[in-house]
Amino acid sequence: MGEMSGPVDDWTPSARARARTEFRRAQHRRALLVALVATLLVVAVVVLVVTTAPGWDRAREAFFSPQRAVEVLPEVAAGLWLNFRVWVVASVVGLVVGLLLAVVRTSRIPALFPLRMLTVAYVDVFRGVPLLLVLLLVGFGLPALRLSWLPVSAAFLGGLAIVLTYTAYFAEIFRAGIESVHPSQVSAARSLGLNRGQATRLVVLPQAVRNVTAPAASMLVSLQKDSGLISILGAVDAIRAAQIATTGDYNFTPYVVAGVLFLLISIPLTRLVDAWSARQGWRGELRRLPGAGVLR
Amino acid sequence: MSDPLLSLRDVRKTFRTHGTTQVVLDGIDLDVAEHQCVVLIGASGSGKSTLLRAVDLLDDVDDGQIVLGGLDIADPWVDADEVRARLALVFQQYNLFPHLRVLDNLTLAPRHVHGRRRADAEADALAMLEKVGLEHKARAYPDQLSGGEQQRAAIARALVGNPDLLLLDEVTSALDPALVGEVLDLLTALRDEGTTMLIATHEMGFARDVAHEVVFLHEGRIHERGTPAEVLDHPQRPETQEFLRRIR
Protein backbone atom coordinates (compact mmCIF):
# COMPACT_ATOMS: atom_id res chain seq x y z
CA MET A 1 0.00 0.00 0.00
CA GLY A 2 1.33 3.42 -0.95
CA GLU A 3 0.60 6.88 0.33
CA MET A 4 -3.10 7.56 0.89
CA SER A 5 -3.88 10.65 -1.11
CA GLY A 6 -7.57 10.69 -0.27
CA PRO A 7 -10.12 8.27 -1.63
CA VAL A 8 -10.27 8.06 -5.42
CA ASP A 9 -13.51 7.00 -7.04
CA ASP A 10 -12.40 4.20 -9.35
CA TRP A 11 -14.97 1.74 -8.09
CA THR A 12 -16.87 -0.62 -10.35
CA PRO A 13 -19.78 -2.41 -8.71
CA SER A 14 -19.21 -6.11 -8.06
CA ALA A 15 -21.62 -8.70 -9.43
CA ARG A 16 -23.03 -8.90 -5.92
CA ALA A 17 -23.70 -5.14 -5.81
CA ARG A 18 -25.32 -5.25 -9.24
CA ALA A 19 -27.62 -8.08 -8.16
CA ARG A 20 -28.64 -6.08 -5.09
CA THR A 21 -29.31 -2.99 -7.18
CA GLU A 22 -31.42 -5.07 -9.57
CA PHE A 23 -33.36 -6.49 -6.61
CA ARG A 24 -34.04 -3.01 -5.22
CA ARG A 25 -35.16 -1.80 -8.65
CA ALA A 26 -37.54 -4.73 -8.96
CA GLN A 27 -38.90 -3.94 -5.50
CA HIS A 28 -39.35 -0.33 -6.51
CA ARG A 29 -41.16 -1.33 -9.71
CA ARG A 30 -43.44 -3.61 -7.71
CA ALA A 31 -44.22 -0.79 -5.27
CA LEU A 32 -45.15 1.50 -8.17
CA LEU A 33 -47.35 -1.19 -9.67
CA VAL A 34 -49.13 -1.77 -6.35
CA ALA A 35 -49.73 1.98 -6.00
CA LEU A 36 -51.09 2.18 -9.54
CA VAL A 37 -53.41 -0.80 -9.16
CA ALA A 38 -54.69 0.43 -5.80
CA THR A 39 -55.41 3.88 -7.24
CA LEU A 40 -57.23 2.50 -10.27
CA LEU A 41 -59.28 0.23 -8.01
CA VAL A 42 -60.39 3.10 -5.78
CA VAL A 43 -61.25 5.34 -8.74
CA ALA A 44 -63.20 2.53 -10.42
CA VAL A 45 -65.23 1.83 -7.27
CA VAL A 46 -66.06 5.52 -6.76
CA VAL A 47 -67.08 6.00 -10.41
CA LEU A 48 -69.17 2.84 -10.34
CA VAL A 49 -70.99 3.75 -7.12
CA VAL A 50 -71.74 7.29 -8.25
CA THR A 51 -72.80 6.58 -11.83
CA THR A 52 -75.03 3.63 -10.95
CA ALA A 53 -76.86 5.61 -8.26
CA PRO A 54 -80.57 5.90 -9.10
CA GLY A 55 -80.49 9.69 -9.08
CA TRP A 56 -77.22 10.08 -10.99
CA ASP A 57 -78.74 11.43 -14.23
CA ARG A 58 -80.69 14.14 -12.46
CA ALA A 59 -77.80 14.97 -10.12
CA ARG A 60 -75.44 15.33 -13.05
CA GLU A 61 -77.81 17.75 -14.70
CA ALA A 62 -78.36 19.73 -11.48
CA PHE A 63 -74.72 19.97 -10.37
CA PHE A 64 -72.54 19.48 -13.43
CA SER A 65 -74.28 21.26 -16.27
CA PRO A 66 -71.54 22.53 -18.59
CA GLN A 67 -73.54 25.30 -20.27
CA ARG A 68 -74.82 26.57 -16.90
CA ALA A 69 -71.21 26.60 -15.64
CA VAL A 70 -70.09 28.74 -18.57
CA GLU A 71 -73.05 31.10 -18.09
CA VAL A 72 -72.42 31.80 -14.39
CA LEU A 73 -68.63 31.81 -14.49
CA PRO A 74 -68.27 35.62 -14.97
CA GLU A 75 -70.59 36.45 -12.04
CA VAL A 76 -69.03 33.90 -9.69
CA ALA A 77 -65.52 34.96 -10.71
CA ALA A 78 -66.43 38.60 -10.05
CA GLY A 79 -67.63 37.53 -6.61
CA LEU A 80 -64.38 35.65 -6.05
CA TRP A 81 -62.45 38.89 -6.63
CA LEU A 82 -64.08 40.21 -3.45
CA ASN A 83 -63.11 37.02 -1.59
CA PHE A 84 -59.59 37.48 -2.84
CA ARG A 85 -59.33 41.08 -1.61
CA VAL A 86 -60.78 40.19 1.77
CA TRP A 87 -58.39 37.29 1.99
CA VAL A 88 -55.28 39.34 1.15
CA VAL A 89 -56.10 42.19 3.54
CA ALA A 90 -57.15 39.87 6.37
CA SER A 91 -54.01 37.73 5.87
CA VAL A 92 -51.62 40.66 6.02
CA VAL A 93 -53.32 42.32 8.98
CA GLY A 94 -53.81 38.98 10.77
CA LEU A 95 -50.19 37.88 10.33
CA VAL A 96 -48.64 41.21 11.33
CA VAL A 97 -50.90 41.95 14.29
CA GLY A 98 -50.90 38.30 15.33
CA LEU A 99 -47.10 38.31 15.45
CA LEU A 100 -47.09 41.54 17.47
CA LEU A 101 -49.61 40.11 19.93
CA ALA A 102 -47.53 36.94 20.27
CA VAL A 103 -44.42 39.01 21.04
CA VAL A 104 -46.31 41.04 23.62
CA ARG A 105 -47.76 37.95 25.20
CA THR A 106 -44.41 36.17 25.53
CA SER A 107 -42.40 39.22 26.58
CA ARG A 108 -41.43 39.61 30.19
CA ILE A 109 -41.19 43.39 30.28
CA PRO A 110 -43.07 44.53 33.41
CA ALA A 111 -44.44 47.68 31.77
CA LEU A 112 -46.23 45.55 29.20
CA PHE A 113 -48.21 43.68 31.86
CA PRO A 114 -51.57 45.40 31.19
CA LEU A 115 -51.12 44.94 27.46
CA ARG A 116 -50.29 41.29 28.09
CA MET A 117 -53.51 40.77 30.02
CA LEU A 118 -55.43 42.50 27.26
CA THR A 119 -53.86 40.21 24.68
CA VAL A 120 -54.77 37.13 26.68
CA ALA A 121 -58.37 38.32 27.03
CA TYR A 122 -58.60 39.21 23.33
CA VAL A 123 -57.26 35.83 22.20
CA ASP A 124 -59.48 33.94 24.63
CA VAL A 125 -62.60 35.73 23.44
CA PHE A 126 -62.08 35.72 19.71
CA ARG A 127 -60.66 32.23 19.54
CA GLY A 128 -63.52 30.92 21.61
CA VAL A 129 -66.47 32.54 19.79
CA PRO A 130 -67.66 31.00 16.49
CA LEU A 131 -66.68 33.09 13.49
CA LEU A 132 -70.30 33.12 12.37
CA LEU A 133 -71.33 34.77 15.62
CA VAL A 134 -68.55 37.38 15.37
CA LEU A 135 -69.70 38.12 11.83
CA LEU A 136 -73.30 38.64 12.92
CA LEU A 137 -72.39 40.73 15.95
CA VAL A 138 -69.96 42.95 14.02
CA GLY A 139 -72.11 43.07 10.90
CA PHE A 140 -75.31 44.06 12.63
CA GLY A 141 -74.00 45.48 15.89
CA LEU A 142 -71.50 48.09 14.70
CA PRO A 143 -73.87 49.84 12.24
CA ALA A 144 -76.39 50.16 15.08
CA LEU A 145 -73.93 52.51 16.81
CA ARG A 146 -74.44 54.98 13.92
CA LEU A 147 -70.82 56.14 13.96
CA SER A 148 -70.57 58.49 11.01
CA TRP A 149 -66.88 57.70 10.33
CA LEU A 150 -67.33 53.93 10.28
CA PRO A 151 -67.84 52.31 6.87
CA VAL A 152 -70.88 50.08 7.03
CA SER A 153 -70.51 48.12 3.80
CA ALA A 154 -71.03 44.38 4.27
CA ALA A 155 -67.61 43.68 2.78
CA PHE A 156 -65.85 45.97 5.26
CA LEU A 157 -67.68 44.72 8.33
CA GLY A 158 -67.36 41.10 7.22
CA GLY A 159 -63.64 41.59 6.63
CA LEU A 160 -63.28 43.18 10.06
CA ALA A 161 -64.96 40.23 11.75
CA ILE A 162 -62.68 37.81 9.94
CA VAL A 163 -59.60 39.86 10.87
CA LEU A 164 -60.65 39.93 14.52
CA THR A 165 -61.02 36.15 14.67
CA TYR A 166 -58.02 35.16 12.60
CA THR A 167 -55.65 37.56 14.32
CA ALA A 168 -56.39 35.66 17.51
CA TYR A 169 -55.56 32.35 15.78
CA PHE A 170 -52.34 33.72 14.30
CA ALA A 171 -51.32 35.12 17.68
CA GLU A 172 -51.61 31.65 19.18
CA ILE A 173 -49.70 30.01 16.35
CA PHE A 174 -46.83 32.48 16.65
CA ARG A 175 -46.82 32.14 20.43
CA ALA A 176 -46.35 28.40 20.02
CA GLY A 177 -43.52 29.15 17.58
CA ILE A 178 -41.78 31.54 19.97
CA GLU A 179 -42.06 29.08 22.83
CA SER A 180 -40.57 26.33 20.66
CA VAL A 181 -37.25 28.19 20.37
CA HIS A 182 -34.82 26.80 22.91
CA PRO A 183 -33.94 29.23 25.74
CA SER A 184 -30.25 28.60 25.10
CA GLN A 185 -30.69 30.50 21.84
CA VAL A 186 -31.63 33.57 23.86
CA SER A 187 -28.69 32.99 26.19
CA ALA A 188 -26.34 32.79 23.22
CA ALA A 189 -27.77 35.97 21.69
CA ARG A 190 -27.66 37.89 24.96
CA SER A 191 -24.12 36.74 25.70
CA LEU A 192 -23.09 38.32 22.38
CA GLY A 193 -24.38 41.63 23.72
CA LEU A 194 -27.72 41.77 21.93
CA ASN A 195 -30.39 43.43 24.01
CA ARG A 196 -33.77 41.89 24.70
CA GLY A 197 -35.42 43.41 21.64
CA GLN A 198 -32.57 42.50 19.32
CA ALA A 199 -32.46 38.94 20.60
CA THR A 200 -36.20 38.60 19.98
CA ARG A 201 -36.12 40.22 16.56
CA LEU A 202 -32.92 38.77 15.15
CA VAL A 203 -32.71 35.35 16.78
CA VAL A 204 -36.00 34.18 18.29
CA LEU A 205 -38.58 35.39 15.77
CA PRO A 206 -36.88 34.08 12.61
CA GLN A 207 -36.71 30.60 14.15
CA ALA A 208 -40.21 30.89 15.60
CA VAL A 209 -41.69 31.75 12.20
CA ARG A 210 -39.92 28.81 10.56
CA ASN A 211 -41.19 26.40 13.14
CA VAL A 212 -44.80 27.37 12.48
CA THR A 213 -44.76 27.89 8.72
CA ALA A 214 -46.95 24.84 8.11
CA PRO A 215 -49.73 25.62 10.62
CA ALA A 216 -49.71 29.31 9.63
CA ALA A 217 -50.04 28.35 5.97
CA SER A 218 -52.96 26.04 6.68
CA MET A 219 -54.55 28.88 8.64
CA LEU A 220 -54.17 31.10 5.55
CA VAL A 221 -55.98 28.53 3.43
CA SER A 222 -58.69 28.27 6.04
CA LEU A 223 -58.98 32.06 6.02
CA GLN A 224 -59.37 32.04 2.26
CA LYS A 225 -62.32 29.66 2.56
CA ASP A 226 -63.90 31.50 5.46
CA SER A 227 -63.82 34.74 3.48
CA GLY A 228 -66.95 33.27 1.88
CA LEU A 229 -68.81 33.69 5.15
CA ILE A 230 -69.12 37.44 4.59
CA SER A 231 -71.91 36.52 2.17
CA ILE A 232 -74.28 36.14 5.13
CA LEU A 233 -74.02 39.90 5.64
CA GLY A 234 -75.13 40.41 2.05
CA ALA A 235 -71.75 41.07 0.42
CA VAL A 236 -71.80 39.62 -3.09
CA ASP A 237 -68.82 37.29 -3.00
CA ALA A 238 -68.40 34.06 -4.99
CA ILE A 239 -70.74 32.08 -2.75
CA ARG A 240 -73.43 34.78 -2.72
CA ALA A 241 -73.14 35.19 -6.49
CA ALA A 242 -73.56 31.43 -6.91
CA GLN A 243 -76.54 31.46 -4.55
CA ILE A 244 -78.20 34.23 -6.54
CA ALA A 245 -77.59 32.29 -9.75
CA THR A 246 -79.30 29.16 -8.40
CA THR A 247 -82.55 30.93 -7.55
CA GLY A 248 -85.16 30.34 -10.21
CA ASP A 249 -84.04 27.15 -11.86
CA TYR A 250 -82.78 25.05 -8.94
CA ASN A 251 -79.65 24.18 -10.88
CA PHE A 252 -76.79 24.00 -8.39
CA THR A 253 -73.94 24.07 -10.89
CA PRO A 254 -72.93 27.59 -9.75
CA TYR A 255 -71.98 26.18 -6.31
CA VAL A 256 -69.71 23.64 -7.97
CA VAL A 257 -68.18 26.43 -10.05
CA ALA A 258 -67.54 28.46 -6.90
CA GLY A 259 -66.00 25.40 -5.21
CA VAL A 260 -63.65 24.81 -8.13
CA LEU A 261 -62.62 28.47 -8.14
CA PHE A 262 -61.78 28.32 -4.41
CA LEU A 263 -59.67 25.22 -5.03
CA LEU A 264 -57.87 27.00 -7.85
CA ILE A 265 -56.54 29.45 -5.26
CA SER A 266 -56.04 27.25 -2.22
CA ILE A 267 -54.27 24.26 -3.77
CA PRO A 268 -51.53 26.28 -5.53
CA LEU A 269 -51.19 28.34 -2.34
CA THR A 270 -50.41 25.34 -0.13
CA ARG A 271 -48.04 23.87 -2.71
CA LEU A 272 -46.29 27.23 -3.01
CA VAL A 273 -45.76 27.52 0.73
CA ASP A 274 -44.46 23.93 0.88
CA ALA A 275 -42.05 24.51 -1.99
CA TRP A 276 -40.87 27.80 -0.57
CA SER A 277 -40.22 26.49 2.93
CA ALA A 278 -38.50 23.42 1.46
CA ARG A 279 -36.23 25.66 -0.57
CA GLN A 280 -35.41 27.71 2.49
CA GLY A 281 -34.38 24.44 4.10
CA TRP A 282 -36.96 24.89 6.86
CA ARG A 283 -38.88 21.81 6.00
CA GLY A 284 -37.39 18.39 6.29
CA GLU A 285 -34.02 19.55 7.57
CA LEU A 286 -33.95 16.56 9.90
CA ARG A 287 -34.18 14.33 6.85
CA ARG A 288 -30.52 14.88 6.11
CA LEU A 289 -29.33 13.54 9.46
CA PRO A 290 -28.02 9.99 9.82
CA GLY A 291 -30.90 7.69 10.59
CA ALA A 292 -33.43 9.79 8.73
CA GLY A 293 -33.41 7.61 5.63
CA VAL A 294 -35.82 4.83 4.80
CA LEU A 295 -34.85 1.68 6.65
CA ARG A 296 -35.42 -1.65 5.04
CA MET B 1 -11.31 -21.91 15.12
CA SER B 2 -14.85 -21.79 13.78
CA ASP B 3 -16.18 -19.04 11.55
CA PRO B 4 -16.33 -15.62 13.19
CA LEU B 5 -19.74 -14.34 14.28
CA LEU B 6 -19.41 -11.23 12.15
CA SER B 7 -17.34 -10.91 9.05
CA LEU B 8 -17.03 -7.90 6.75
CA ARG B 9 -15.52 -8.34 3.30
CA ASP B 10 -14.60 -5.46 1.01
CA VAL B 11 -17.38 -3.24 2.37
CA ARG B 12 -17.79 0.03 0.56
CA LYS B 13 -20.01 3.00 1.28
CA THR B 14 -20.17 6.48 -0.24
CA PHE B 15 -22.13 9.57 0.63
CA ARG B 16 -23.28 11.72 -2.24
CA THR B 17 -24.18 15.29 -1.35
CA HIS B 18 -24.56 18.19 -3.76
CA GLY B 19 -22.85 16.34 -6.56
CA THR B 20 -19.71 15.39 -4.65
CA THR B 21 -18.98 11.80 -3.73
CA GLN B 22 -17.28 10.99 -0.48
CA VAL B 23 -16.03 7.48 0.13
CA VAL B 24 -16.61 6.74 3.84
CA LEU B 25 -15.92 3.01 3.83
CA ASP B 26 -13.36 1.96 1.28
CA GLY B 27 -12.93 -1.80 1.18
CA ILE B 28 -13.30 -2.79 4.83
CA ASP B 29 -12.36 -6.34 5.91
CA LEU B 30 -13.10 -7.10 9.53
CA ASP B 31 -13.87 -10.13 11.70
CA VAL B 32 -15.42 -10.33 15.14
CA ALA B 33 -15.35 -13.79 16.71
CA GLU B 34 -17.71 -14.83 19.44
CA HIS B 35 -16.78 -13.54 22.92
CA GLN B 36 -14.29 -11.15 21.33
CA CYS B 37 -14.08 -7.45 21.86
CA VAL B 38 -12.93 -5.48 18.81
CA VAL B 39 -12.25 -1.77 19.23
CA LEU B 40 -12.30 0.71 16.35
CA ILE B 41 -10.20 3.83 16.75
CA GLY B 42 -9.64 6.75 14.43
CA ALA B 43 -10.43 10.42 14.01
CA SER B 44 -13.94 11.79 13.58
CA GLY B 45 -15.03 11.11 10.04
CA SER B 46 -12.81 8.08 9.63
CA GLY B 47 -15.87 5.85 9.13
CA LYS B 48 -16.28 4.24 12.58
CA SER B 49 -19.90 5.25 13.10
CA THR B 50 -20.85 4.49 9.51
CA LEU B 51 -19.38 1.01 9.90
CA LEU B 52 -21.42 0.32 13.04
CA ARG B 53 -24.59 1.71 11.46
CA ALA B 54 -24.02 -0.44 8.39
CA VAL B 55 -23.65 -3.58 10.51
CA ASP B 56 -26.92 -2.74 12.32
CA LEU B 57 -28.56 -2.22 8.88
CA LEU B 58 -29.40 1.40 9.63
CA ASP B 59 -27.51 2.39 6.46
CA ASP B 60 -27.18 0.44 3.21
CA VAL B 61 -23.69 -0.19 1.88
CA ASP B 62 -22.77 0.15 -1.78
CA ASP B 63 -20.82 -3.07 -2.07
CA GLY B 64 -19.25 -5.92 -0.15
CA GLN B 65 -20.45 -8.54 2.30
CA ILE B 66 -21.57 -8.25 5.90
CA VAL B 67 -21.84 -11.83 7.06
CA LEU B 68 -23.55 -12.43 10.39
CA GLY B 69 -23.74 -16.05 11.52
CA GLY B 70 -23.24 -17.27 7.96
CA LEU B 71 -25.86 -14.95 6.40
CA ASP B 72 -24.90 -11.99 4.20
CA ILE B 73 -27.13 -9.36 5.79
CA ALA B 74 -26.14 -6.70 3.24
CA ASP B 75 -28.39 -8.49 0.76
CA PRO B 76 -31.61 -6.49 0.50
CA TRP B 77 -33.75 -9.63 0.43
CA VAL B 78 -32.70 -10.49 3.98
CA ASP B 79 -35.32 -9.49 6.57
CA ALA B 80 -33.62 -6.52 8.22
CA ASP B 81 -35.99 -6.39 11.20
CA GLU B 82 -35.01 -9.92 12.11
CA VAL B 83 -31.30 -9.07 11.86
CA ARG B 84 -31.63 -5.89 13.93
CA ALA B 85 -33.51 -7.85 16.58
CA ARG B 86 -30.38 -10.01 17.01
CA LEU B 87 -28.02 -7.03 17.26
CA ALA B 88 -27.97 -4.06 19.57
CA LEU B 89 -26.49 -0.63 18.94
CA VAL B 90 -25.84 1.86 21.72
CA PHE B 91 -25.69 5.46 20.51
CA GLN B 92 -23.47 8.33 21.56
CA GLN B 93 -26.57 10.37 22.50
CA TYR B 94 -28.24 7.44 24.40
CA ASN B 95 -31.51 7.89 22.48
CA LEU B 96 -33.63 6.73 25.37
CA PHE B 97 -37.31 7.31 24.66
CA PRO B 98 -38.19 10.36 26.79
CA HIS B 99 -41.91 9.53 27.01
CA LEU B 100 -41.23 6.15 28.66
CA ARG B 101 -39.95 5.31 32.13
CA VAL B 102 -36.57 3.58 32.29
CA LEU B 103 -38.23 0.21 32.91
CA ASP B 104 -40.57 0.68 29.93
CA ASN B 105 -37.61 1.67 27.76
CA LEU B 106 -36.12 -1.72 28.61
CA THR B 107 -39.28 -3.77 28.10
CA LEU B 108 -40.37 -2.12 24.85
CA ALA B 109 -38.51 -4.43 22.47
CA PRO B 110 -38.89 -7.64 24.53
CA ARG B 111 -42.66 -7.13 24.66
CA HIS B 112 -43.32 -5.85 21.16
CA VAL B 113 -40.54 -7.49 19.15
CA HIS B 114 -39.85 -10.70 21.03
CA GLY B 115 -43.43 -11.18 22.22
CA ARG B 116 -42.57 -11.56 25.91
CA ARG B 117 -45.29 -11.21 28.50
CA ARG B 118 -45.19 -7.99 30.45
CA ALA B 119 -44.43 -9.62 33.82
CA ASP B 120 -41.57 -11.70 32.37
CA ALA B 121 -40.13 -8.76 30.46
CA GLU B 122 -40.23 -6.57 33.56
CA ALA B 123 -38.55 -9.23 35.69
CA ASP B 124 -35.73 -9.48 33.13
CA ALA B 125 -35.51 -5.71 32.83
CA LEU B 126 -35.25 -5.25 36.60
CA ALA B 127 -32.51 -7.87 36.76
CA MET B 128 -30.66 -6.06 33.98
CA LEU B 129 -31.09 -2.69 35.71
CA GLU B 130 -29.69 -4.20 38.89
CA LYS B 131 -26.70 -5.40 36.93
CA VAL B 132 -25.98 -1.88 35.67
CA GLY B 133 -26.72 -0.42 39.13
CA LEU B 134 -29.94 1.37 38.22
CA GLU B 135 -32.67 -0.72 39.85
CA HIS B 136 -33.65 2.30 41.96
CA LYS B 137 -34.28 4.33 38.80
CA ALA B 138 -36.66 1.88 37.12
CA ARG B 139 -39.68 4.13 37.63
CA ALA B 140 -37.86 7.35 36.71
CA TYR B 141 -38.06 9.10 33.35
CA PRO B 142 -34.83 9.45 31.34
CA ASP B 143 -34.55 13.20 31.90
CA GLN B 144 -34.43 12.60 35.65
CA LEU B 145 -31.17 10.66 35.22
CA SER B 146 -27.59 11.89 34.93
CA GLY B 147 -25.79 11.41 31.63
CA GLY B 148 -23.88 8.41 32.90
CA GLU B 149 -27.05 6.84 34.27
CA GLN B 150 -28.84 7.43 30.98
CA GLN B 151 -26.06 5.75 29.06
CA ARG B 152 -26.01 2.79 31.46
CA ALA B 153 -29.78 2.53 31.02
CA ALA B 154 -29.29 2.59 27.24
CA ILE B 155 -26.72 -0.21 27.52
CA ALA B 156 -29.13 -2.17 29.71
CA ARG B 157 -31.84 -1.64 27.10
CA ALA B 158 -29.51 -3.00 24.43
CA LEU B 159 -28.52 -6.04 26.52
CA VAL B 160 -31.94 -7.07 27.77
CA GLY B 161 -32.81 -8.66 24.43
CA ASN B 162 -29.73 -10.94 24.63
CA PRO B 163 -28.15 -9.72 21.39
CA ASP B 164 -25.58 -11.86 19.60
CA LEU B 165 -23.43 -8.78 19.15
CA LEU B 166 -23.30 -5.49 21.01
CA LEU B 167 -22.34 -2.44 18.94
CA LEU B 168 -21.20 0.67 20.84
CA ASP B 169 -20.79 3.98 19.06
CA GLU B 170 -18.64 6.36 21.14
CA VAL B 171 -20.87 5.81 24.13
CA THR B 172 -18.83 8.04 26.41
CA SER B 173 -18.26 10.99 24.08
CA ALA B 174 -21.31 12.94 25.25
CA LEU B 175 -20.54 12.38 28.93
CA ASP B 176 -19.06 14.58 31.58
CA PRO B 177 -15.51 13.27 32.25
CA ALA B 178 -16.50 12.41 35.82
CA LEU B 179 -19.23 10.11 34.50
CA VAL B 180 -17.16 8.29 31.88
CA GLY B 181 -15.70 5.86 34.42
CA GLU B 182 -18.98 4.29 35.49
CA VAL B 183 -19.87 3.47 31.88
CA LEU B 184 -16.44 2.11 31.00
CA ASP B 185 -16.42 -0.03 34.17
CA LEU B 186 -19.72 -1.54 33.06
CA LEU B 187 -18.36 -2.31 29.59
CA THR B 188 -15.22 -3.87 31.06
CA ALA B 189 -17.40 -6.13 33.21
CA LEU B 190 -19.41 -7.11 30.14
CA ARG B 191 -16.24 -8.00 28.27
CA ASP B 192 -15.09 -10.19 31.14
CA GLU B 193 -18.40 -12.07 30.93
CA GLY B 194 -17.71 -12.80 27.28
CA THR B 195 -20.12 -10.39 25.62
CA THR B 196 -19.26 -10.08 21.94
CA MET B 197 -18.65 -6.41 21.24
CA LEU B 198 -17.68 -4.09 18.41
CA ILE B 199 -16.78 -0.72 19.90
CA ALA B 200 -15.95 2.67 18.42
CA THR B 201 -14.22 4.87 20.97
CA HIS B 202 -11.90 7.79 21.58
CA GLU B 203 -10.87 6.44 25.01
CA MET B 204 -7.44 4.93 24.36
CA GLY B 205 -6.96 3.74 27.93
CA PHE B 206 -10.21 1.85 27.71
CA ALA B 207 -9.28 0.41 24.32
CA ARG B 208 -6.04 -0.88 25.81
CA ASP B 209 -7.91 -2.47 28.72
CA VAL B 210 -10.70 -4.27 26.93
CA ALA B 211 -9.73 -4.87 23.30
CA HIS B 212 -8.77 -8.28 22.00
CA GLU B 213 -8.07 -6.47 18.77
CA VAL B 214 -7.61 -2.77 18.02
CA VAL B 215 -8.42 -1.57 14.50
CA PHE B 216 -7.27 1.83 13.27
CA LEU B 217 -9.49 3.46 10.65
CA HIS B 218 -8.36 6.40 8.55
CA GLU B 219 -10.33 7.89 5.67
CA GLY B 220 -12.51 4.84 5.34
CA ARG B 221 -9.70 2.28 5.29
CA ILE B 222 -8.19 0.02 7.89
CA HIS B 223 -4.56 1.08 8.19
CA GLU B 224 -3.48 -1.02 11.11
CA ARG B 225 -4.83 -3.78 13.30
CA GLY B 226 -3.50 -5.94 16.09
CA THR B 227 -3.34 -6.33 19.84
CA PRO B 228 -3.55 -3.14 21.89
CA ALA B 229 0.17 -3.38 22.55
CA GLU B 230 0.96 -3.64 18.85
CA VAL B 231 -1.26 -0.84 17.59
CA LEU B 232 -1.17 1.58 20.51
CA ASP B 233 2.40 1.14 21.71
CA HIS B 234 4.26 0.22 18.53
CA PRO B 235 2.28 1.64 15.62
CA GLN B 236 3.94 0.83 12.31
CA ARG B 237 2.17 3.16 9.93
CA PRO B 238 2.68 6.94 9.83
CA GLU B 239 -1.08 7.63 9.90
CA THR B 240 -1.45 5.65 13.14
CA GLN B 241 1.58 7.34 14.69
CA GLU B 242 0.25 10.76 13.73
CA PHE B 243 -3.23 10.00 15.13
CA LEU B 244 -1.87 8.70 18.42
CA ARG B 245 0.49 11.66 18.77
CA ARG B 246 -2.39 14.11 18.29
CA ILE B 247 -4.69 12.64 20.88
CA ARG B 248 -2.02 12.21 23.48
Image (spheres, helix red, strand yellow):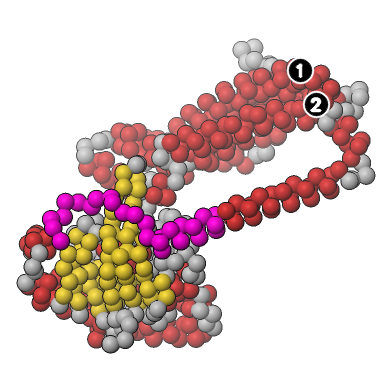
**Percent position of residue B229, x then y:** 10, 77
Q: Image height check: is A268 above or below B212?
A: above
- Picture residue at 35% right of the left edge, 64% below the top: B64
Q: Earlier in the sequence, mark 1 or mark 2?
A: 1
* Pointer 1 residue: A75
Q: Nearer the viewer, residue A26 or A158?
A: A26
Q: Nearer the viewer, residue A35 or A115?
A: A35
Is circle 1 on the same chain as circle 2? yes
- Answer with the quarter of the image where residue A199 lies: top left
Q: Quick check: can you spot residue A109? A: no
- Answer with the quarter of the image where residue A131 lies: top right
Disc number for residue A254 = 2
Left or right: residue A40 compared with residue B4: right
What is the CA distance from the residue labelled 1 to the residue labelled 2? 9 Å
Report crowding for label 2: few under 14, some 14 to 19, many 20 or more residues within 10 A (C-alpha): many
**Percent position of residue A114, x then y:** 44, 36
**Percent position of residue B17, x then y:** 34, 45
Q: Image height check: is A193 above or below A285?
A: above
**Percent position of residue B29, x then y:** 27, 69
Q: Image height check: is A265 above or below B247?
A: above
Task: Give the residues drawn in magenta, as a range.
Answer: A1-28
Q: Is residue A22 part of the magenta span, yes or no? A: yes
- Tags 1 and 2 in contact by the CB under 8 Å rule? yes
Query: What secondary structure is marked by label 1?
Result: helix
Q: Is residue A59 part of the magenta span, yes or no? A: no
Query: Label 2: chain?
Result: A
- Picture residue at 24% right of the left edge, 56% below the top: B45
